[in-house]
Structures are given as C-alpha cells and as structure tokens.
Image (cartoon, helix red, strand yellow):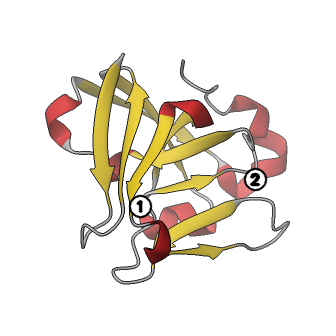
Amino acid sequence: MTTHKGGCHCGRVRFEVDAPGDIEADQCNCSICRKSGYLHLMVPKQAFRLISGEDDLQTYTFNTNVAQHYFCRHCGIKSFYVPRSHPTGISVNTNCLEPETILSLKITPFDGSNWEENAHKLSPLSD
C-alpha cells in the first residue's frame, strides 16, 4: 500500500489516498467521464483524506442525483467524487495523482454509456 498525493490544477484542493503503487483504473465512456478524461481509482472512504480545499469544492449531480461529483470552484477540476456504483467509497481521478508514487497504471475500458447493463463489471474498491 502506498500513500498517493494529489489535487486539482490550481492546488487549492489537496488530498491523500492509500492505494497500491500498481494502480488499476477504469476508463469510463459515459458523457461526463469521457468529456473530463476521468480515470477511476475506487477506494474505501477511510483510504481517502481531504488535506485542504474543502471550502473550495462545489458539488455537481445529474440523472439519479446519487453520485456526488466534487470539483474545485476555481479551476474546475474534478479530482474525486462519491460514485453511484460505490456510494460507500471514493473514486479518485488517477490523472490528478502526483506521478512519483505510481509504479504502474493499468487502464481498463468500461462501457458507462450503458451503465445499467455494465455496473456490475466495475472494479471493486481497492483495499
């Protein structure tokens, strides 16, 4: 297990996440993930720590309004969110992690455009 550091583009939102050094991320093709270039690393909530920027976060919801998409109100980057598929976890955008602690990155395509039929195929929360 490695402690990865990350954050938004402007640096106001900073976090740490405990996850393997060899990261397996899902690349979803749903409308929001495709447009934002999001690479999902699912972790339990207790593996995620918001270090700074809580007051700089805004929340966006759509469709079922279950997923809580947090983004920096200054630079617009969504570095993490609470996903509908794993409401007890956090999805961290692997693209927002500092690269020094990433040993390898395996990206698995996920057909989120057909979410209802494919949600069961998402990676489980990494321990």
Label placed on residue 48: none
Q: Is residue 69 left or right of residue 23?
A: right
- The residue sitting at 46% across, 43% down in the picture is 49
Taking the view exactly as shown, the residue that stands out farthest to the left is 100
| Location of residue 80 with respect to 36 vertically, above or below | above
Q: Quadrant of residue 113?
A: bottom right
Of callouts 1 and 2, which one flags the residue occurring earlier in the amino acid sequence? 1
Q: Is residue 100 left or right of residue 47?
A: left
The residue carrying mark 2 is 114
- The residue sitting at 46% across, 65% down in the picture is 78
| Location of residue 124 with respect to 36 vertically, above or below | above
How many labels, in total? 2
The residue carrying mark 1 is 37
- Say which of marks 1 and 2 sits in front: 1
Q: Residues within 10 Å of mark 2 (few under 14, many from 20)?
A: few
Q: Nearer the viewer, residue 37 or 44?
A: 44
Position of residue 51 measured from the top left corner of the image (x, y, whole percent): 37, 51
- The residue sitting at 33% across, 80% down in the picture is 75
> Which quadrant would the N terminus be assigned to in this image?
top left
Q: Is residue 44 visible?
A: no
| Location of residue 45 with respect to 95 vertically, above or below | above
Q: Residues within 10 Å of mark 1 (few under 14, many from 20)?
A: some
Q: Nearer the viewer, residue 96 or 44?
A: 44
Position of residue 119 measured from the top left corner of the image (x, y, whole percent): 76, 40
Secondary structure of residue under mark 2: helix
Secondary structure of residue under mark 1: loop
Give the amino acid type for the residue marked by disc 2 in the picture.
Asn
For marks 1 and 2, give the CA distance: 18 Å
